[in-house]
Amino acid sequence: MNPVSWWAVAIALITVGVIGTFVPVLPGAAILFGGMLLGAWIDHFQRVGWITLSILAALMVLIFVVDFVAALLGAKRVGASRLAIVGAFLGTIAGLFFGIAGVLIAPFIGAVIGELLASAQLGRAALVGFGTWIGMTIGALVKMALVFAMLAVFVTKYVMH
């Protein structure tokens, strides 16, 4: 394949990766990194080298960490019980299999069920569920910032070389 075709593939991967970071089931951060790695490979790592790729890989890992930790921290922030935190975590994993609605609702439901099991107080359980949802929302904003940071690092390094 010629470089133009490779760049078309790299740009497609980067685009799908950005979208996939916010769409459940797709490993968006990994696809985004794969597109950037392909972009670096196209010119034999002359513009985007291994140091930059290491930074991009670290940002990718951080996106995965934020994805799993955000809901848990939101629940913990409102004083959730250990069962509620476990429920939020299990809800996050289960939600991945049910599309965007599952990702938005399942951690909330998991936290509420866990808190109900721990305290049997509906009002408290609702507060914990809400805290979980707020944590996820903040997590999504952090992931968006990290994705834009990855794009900025890659484009800046590629253009400024």
Image (tube, grey):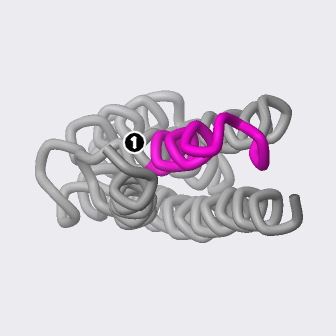
Q: Amino acid at mark 1?
A: Ala
In the rendered image, which quarter is residue 13 located in?
Answer: bottom left
Local crowd size for mark 1, using a 10 Å CA cut-off: few (<14), some (14–19), many (≥20): many
Nearer-the-camera pick, 143 or 60? 60
For the point 48% across and 36% down, the residue is: 85
Residue 153 versus residue 43 in the image, above or below? below
The image quadrant where one finds the N terminus is top left
Question: Is 145 inside the magenta-drawn segment?
Answer: no
Q: Position of residue 7 (x, y in %)?
A: 44, 58
Q: Residue lying furthest front in this view?
A: 2
The residue segment tinted magenta is: 32-48
Describe residue 85's horizontal placement relative to residue 158 as left or right: left
> Magenta residues: mostly which secondary structure?
helix
| Residue denoted by label 1 | 88
Nearer-the-camera pick, 44 or 27? 44
Say if residue 30 shows up in the picture: yes
